[in-house]
Image (cartoon, rainbow, N blue to C red):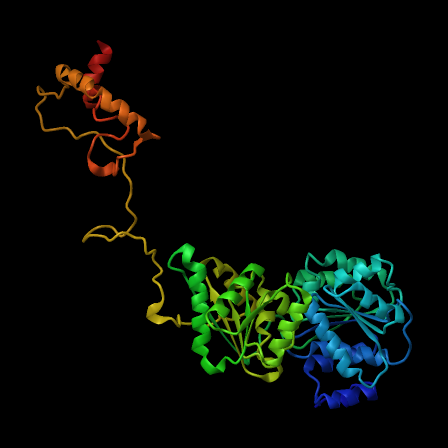
Amino acid sequence: MTKFSDLNLNPKVLKAIDEAGYETPTPIQAGAIPAALEGRDVLGIAQTGTGKTASFVLPMITLLARGRARARMPRSLVLCPTRELAAQVAENFDTYTKHLKLTKALLIGGVSFKEQDMLIDRGVDVLIATPGRLLDHFERGKLLLTGVQIMVVDEADRMLDMGFIPDIERIFSLTPFTRQTLFFSATMAPEIERITNTFLSAPARVEVARQATTGENIKQGVLMFKGSRKDREPSEKRDALRALIDAEGDKCTNAIIFCNRKTDVDIVSKSLAKHGYDAAPIHGDLDQSQRTHTLDGFRAGTLRFLVASDVAARGLDVPAVSHVFNFDVPSHAEDYVHRIGRTGRAGRDGKAVMICIPRDEKNLADIERLVQKEIPRLADPRGTNAPAPQADTAEPKGEGESTGPKKRTRSRKPAKTDTTPDQKPAPDKAETAPQKQDQSGDQDKQNRNTRGGRSRSSGNRDSGNSPVGLGDHMPGFIAMSFEERTESETS
């Protein structure tokens, strides 16, 4: 079995690893570290929670152990998609460089430029940044990337997503062509992999598991949910989430609850807090100090439920997360792998539960196609208290009546009576004329109360009364038979 001592790492790095309590490298570490130490480009693909961060941190600090940084010219660069992930990478550097005199700077949003400028001015060996803040410093003339020897793109598939490609391409153009480049991610779609080929030169591909696989130690399930009514669906869905949490009992020591939209993160968090659950939100619109405080509380165990957007799905390492609840089915199948990878880390058991409404079934099918297995369906934990899927506004039906909605029918002219050919129905002009005269006043009043051809007082079209909009009388020509109308027109 391979040990860290077999990987040709710096002795001071090995001492820090031993003090951190690690003895045996994970498969991705055992495959990527030797290739990185040889100076080769690396494309690393592995499941979440398998130690990908150490796969590039350890060889990087070994290679940087010799040499000295110059002002405003970092020697290495690590790009991360989120502030939280960047901060976590910085913590890993602190852990493994405790016996080395290497400096670092963390460039993320929500922190003053002045403090970051002071660090860059002194010179840093390792620069850890999000793309936006990195370009801000460059455009202000505070940073040069011509001295970068090693460049790392963490969570490469998200970094190379369509929204990041222009920034990534610009940053790469600012670094030397001779740099060493390392890409790491849990998923790598074919179209994204084609883009990486423009940035990597003959890379060593280290793939320790089939792409987009989920850990065998994570028990998965999905609740197929349908609200009783469209306007009640959001609140009933939150009720189902609370029921799922309660059904886990004491086994649910803490959990991350993922929502697709930031507004839903706030709503779900407030709803849980209102019902007595210890929950707090985290998403990109919150102040950085609040995000840091919330995440620290969750890691320390003082916060039980973290309601998050995908800002917390990528790379965040909270070792003992017992459950992940997907309040929404992620719109991108790869995000499901990253979300549930927050539980079951470092060989622990975990559980991932998802709520799927009818319009998300297509996304669920995409996820099952990606992970190449069917996710088990769960029974509604609310049992008999769950609302019926039919709309509760349906009218009671009599025996033998259709259960479908009542159809509106147009008024039809009266059916013919059984008469002989010599007995043709015809209106009596002498009788109808006075009727028109007597009702002329009432008719004017009714016309004023009519909107769009419908009387305000008319209740039901199918009531059998006179046609709506014609007043209380029926013109004679309507009651005439076809033969009578023909004779009248030809005469």
Judged left or right of residue 463, residue 224 is: right
Quadrant where the N terminus is found in the figure: bottom right
Q: Nearer the viewer, residue 292 or 382?
A: 292
- Residue at (77% x, 87% y) in the render: 16
Say if 457 sits above or below 95 in the image. Answer: above
- Residue at (72% x, 81% y) in the render: 29
Quadrant where the C terminus is found in the figure: top left
Can you tell which quarter of the image residue 173 is in?
bottom right
Can you tell which quarter of the image residue 212 is in?
bottom right
Q: Nearer the viewer, residue 386 or 52?
A: 386
Q: Residue furthest top?
A: 491
- Residue at (26% x, 35% y) in the render: 458
Give the mark count.
0
> Residue 463: x and y, percent?
21, 37
> Residue 103: x and y, percent?
84, 76
> Residue 276: x and y, percent?
47, 73
Judged left or right of residue 467, residue 163 is: right
> Residue 126: x and y, percent?
82, 73
Residue 32 in view of the camera: no
Can you tell which quarter of the image residue 132 is in?
bottom right
Judged left or right of residue 371, residue 393 is: left
Q: Nearer the viewer, residue 38 or 338?
A: 338
Say if 453 sits above or below 61 in the image. Answer: above
Residue 345 in view of the camera: yes
Judged left or right of residue 370, residue 40 is: right
